[in-house]
Amino acid sequence: MLVIMAVYSWQLTLVVLLFHLPLLPVLRWMQSRQLVAYDNLRTRVSDTLGVVSESVHGVEVVRAYGYRERMRRRVHGVVDAQYDQQMVAARYFSLVLPLTDVFGVTAIASVVGAGVWWGGAWGVTSGELVAFVFLCNLLVVPITEMGEVLDQTQTALAGWWKILDVLDTEVEVVEPSTTVPLPTGALGVRVEAVDFAYRQGGRVLHGIDVSLPAGASVAVVGETGSGKTTLAKLMARLADPTSGRVLVGGVDLRDVSAEDRRRAIRMVPQDGFLFDTSIAENVRFGRPDATTGDVEAALDALDLTDWVNGLGAGLDTRVGERGESLSVGERQLVALARAHLADPGLLVLDEATSAVDPETETTLERALERLAAGRTTVSVAHRLSTAERSDLVLVFDAGRIAEQGSHDELVARGEIYSGLYRSWLGGTRSPGTSREGMTR
């Protein structure tokens, strides 16, 4: 466009450039300010969604503890902060369009004025001046529209930066370039001189050294924060030790591919997270290519068929968001069936028998017993009934293994575990109900 305009009159073209060149640094400044404003706005939107989600999912706690007014103020606070930031971004946008319009109109007016005043001296005829003004308008319109495009670009860039922040997060577990396959069947575990520390905070594990035989059932007990769950995560390679190594089936987990690791090792978390779909689909997450017959077989193997059929829609029963239509224990039953369908050689249960009603606990214990058959099972236990049934008990204290042995051996020894067990027995309920005891 500028070349064509220069053919008509290079002098008038210079006039146009004289009025448009100052626009570039101004737009550049506006662009940088808009980008910061939209980045902050994305953060505020994220804060708002987080608080609203908390208020919805925690509505029972809010009501039970009379937290309604405080939660209302909290929601209003984040919404107001988002609104204020939205206004900041809107102010920058409201300046861009008028600014480009002013520059465009001023440029056209200057061309007309210069053409009328100096047109004769520059050899510009009235027809050429009209054509030049038309070309100038064609140049100004895209520049004016640039303001709106600029605003949309800044919005997209702010979102893209947030995505890049996630993608650039340092990976805690680095996949090996060359891999060693895990053997099939029950897998023994060897933890060699393992220390572990989270990035923010002190060391959680100190010199853990223990061997777990293949096919054994192992219970890990201890106080809250003693390192039980951290050890479970290391066995599933959800994190790598700061020093030392974890061997499963005689293979360092750092040499095992993610695909092979997911095939051979499964971790069942305490909450038994479920997706908003049917029970069958939630169980099928253990093995995506499983047929309905495979799902039914997994449930039957854990003696859960009658329980599922009693839900009304059977396998097609929808569990709701995060499994909210099921009790805590029932969610754990589905999670155990999912793990059974995956058929791992090493099963890691993180507090999988806590917070359940007596009837479900009986069903859960029976399912766990069947699930453990033929594989190595490591249970982070809050109820010492799990430790009673285990082949080996590891007692954690301040990030170290303070004791290890069978239940009977540790009770006879009269040290930490014996004290925990006596405390648990003292807290048991009357006959006919579940015995609840927490490892404090």
Image (spheres, rainbow, N blue to C red):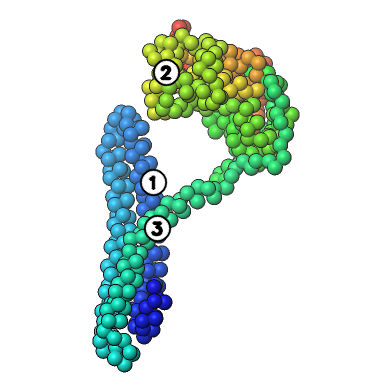
Instruction: Report the mark closest to the observer, 1 or 2.
Output: 2
Q: Is residue 179 visible?
A: yes
Secondary-structure class at tag 3: helix
Classed neighbour count for the residue bearing mark 1: other residues with Cα under 10 Å, few (<14), some (14–19), many (≥20): some
Q: Residue at x 33, y 58 (%)?
A: 89
Residue topped by disc 3: 153
> What x and y, as percent, mark residue 5?
37, 78
Give the alpha-carbon distance from disc 1 to disc 2, as whole Å: 34 Å
Q: Looking at the image, which residue is at 26% across and 89% down? A: 117
| Cα–Cα gap, marks 3 and 1 | 20 Å
Q: Residue at x 54, y 50 (%)?
A: 168
Report the residue marked by disc 1: 46
Residue for point 27% across, 81% down: 127
Looking at the image, the residue that sits furthest to the bottom is 121
Which quadrant would residue 233 be assigned to in this image? Answer: top right
Mark toward the start of the polypeptide (1 vs 2): 1
User: Which residue is identified by label 2?
Assistant: 316
Kindly identify the amino acid type of the residue bearing the numbered disc 2.
Asp
| Front residue of 218 and 204 | 218
Instruction: Give the residue at the far right of this rendering.
Output: 250
Q: Residues within 10 Å of mark 3 (few under 14, many from 20)?
A: some
Q: Mark 2 Cα within 10 Å, few/some/many (few <14, many 20+)? A: some
Q: Amino acid at mark 1?
A: Ser
